Image: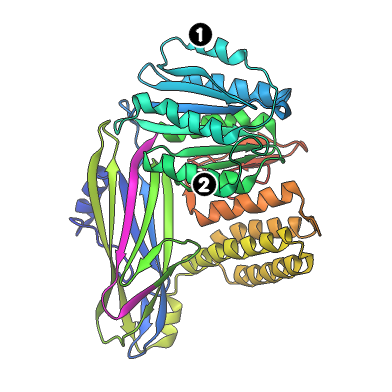
Amino acid sequence: MAGAATMTGGNTARAMDKLDLQEGIRLTTRVDRPLLMRGEKDQEIIVKIDLEGQAWKRPDRMPLNLAVVLDRSGSMTGRKLEQAKQAAQMLVDQLTPRDVFSLVIYDSDVEVLISPRRVENKAALKRTISRIHAGGSTALYAGVKTGGDQLQEFLSGERVNRVMLLSDGLANVGPSSNREIAQLGHRLARQGIPVTTIGLGDDYNEDLMTSLAEASDANYYYVADVEALTGVFRQELGELQSLVARRLVLEIRCPEGVRPIEFIGRQDEVRGQVARVEFGDLAGEQNRFVLLRCQMDRKLDDGRFGLADVNVHYEDIRGGAPTLRDQKAKVFVNATNDRKKAESVVDRDVQVEAELLCNAAVTRDAIAFADAGEVGKYRETVDRQIAKLTSVQASAPAAKQEEIQREIDLLEENKDQVNDQGLDNRARKSLQWNVFRQSNSKASNGGEVKIPQQNGGNVPFQQKDSTSSRKPRVSR
């Protein structure tokens, strides 16, 4: 079948099933145009490469080395801090004696409230957490750095190492620029320490939080409703406890005559005939995908043509100790003289996904216009994008129409939430989070968890077993 992935050792359905059981991930590919026109040059193709973590009920999961970095500045006083403490206590309840836990709190100063230790006395840990009180400013940089330091004692390739940062405000003590915070994130990432960021309320710096998470391909959550905080901690812990692979390197190699142009919506490396993406972790039932735009610089003759060789290299961590694996696929297209036939087999799902990733880039541009006080350009950009998405929706597969409508709704809801000082805080965070979600191509399967909104309604809160897309109140 044109555009299908051929798995190493997977020439039959039986062999494929056996391979899927052996591998921690399933690698599949699709192309938007499996039939190209014979004898024509400069034809463009979009290749989708999808990585799915295999469902895995592991009695022997890899133990965690977890540092929670908790903002206790004055703005956290009251319900925010109480919910944060409850969420941290819930997290402790879900850990085992094989896991290591530490807790750093910060305001104007940083304090290691719980030094790294195995989770053997949960009651004592929870009592310590209950005594946290609020006060002071926000030394966010020092808090994250100290959180990373706590992981060093038990830092190991045979543990899942993670910092979880919670903040509701702006970094205003010590290094505070997005560049400085992102550099810290990159340094921690090189040590094998991803930083998950959780922004609470509408007054924190979302650019800083996304930069810090993106530096290590970790998660970023926007939580407008404090009541949802425990659910966020539960989701993040559930993902960490179900990881199947990490340190994924995806390489797509095209033959002469096929030119890889760009990853749509991503800034990853394309050099010569090779395109390369690095992902951090992959959980069971989680999907990560990329779309690579290619151009056919040669004319096709009869028969099947190899468009690309795909390889994903990763650490399989299902058995406790990591095992290095490689998984391969080949991407093919066919040629035809029948233009109508070629158009009839176009994969509209792939094309719609490309449009949604382009929507993230356009939304990022719109935010930049708003930040610069260019209200007219912001609204023009948003209106133009709404019109484009509406046009795409009209011919999209039924399964994609609802997703497109959510994107249209988000733009329409926030089109007028702007003045010459920029977007209102909540509108900017909703748009920025959506850009983060789309650009990082994180999707998953299964059901939804409903989290109460402040207005009394419900909004989907995406878990790793969820297909929900937009979350204006509780977002990741």
* Depth check, front residue: 254 or 1: 254
Q: In this picture, which residue range is highlighted in magenta?
A: 242-260
Above or below: residue 180 compared with residue 227? below
Image quadrant containing the N terminus: bottom left
CA neighbours of label 1 inside 10 A, class few (<14), some (14 to 19), many (20+): few
Estimate the x, y position of residue 157 in percent, counting from the top left.
29, 34
Horizontal side of 214 relative to 167 (left or right) equals left
Left or right, 345 with respect to 234, comes to left
Amino acid at pointer 1: Ala
Q: Quadrant of residue 119?
A: top left
Residue ID for mark 2: 182
Looking at the image, residue 316 lies above or below residue 287: above
| Quadrant in which the C terminus appears | top right
Marks 1 & 2, CB-CB < 8 Å contact: no
SS class of the residue under badge 1? helix
Q: Residue at x 32, y 25 (%)?
A: 59
Q: Residue at x 48, y 50 (%)?
A: 442
Instruction: Provide the residue designation for mark 1.
Output: 124
Q: Amino acid at mark 2?
A: Ala
Q: What's the mark number on residue 444?
A: none
Whether residue 45 is visible, yes or no, is yes
In space, the residues marked 1 and 2 are separated at their CA atoms by 35 Å
Q: How far across and down, in percent of the image, does residue 295 sit?
A: 39, 78
Closest to the observer, 174 or 296: 174
Tell us which disc is closer to us: 1 or 2.
2
Q: Tell me the chief SS of the magenta region.
A: strand
Coloring scheme of the render? rainbow
Q: Residue at x 44, y 74 (%)?
A: 346
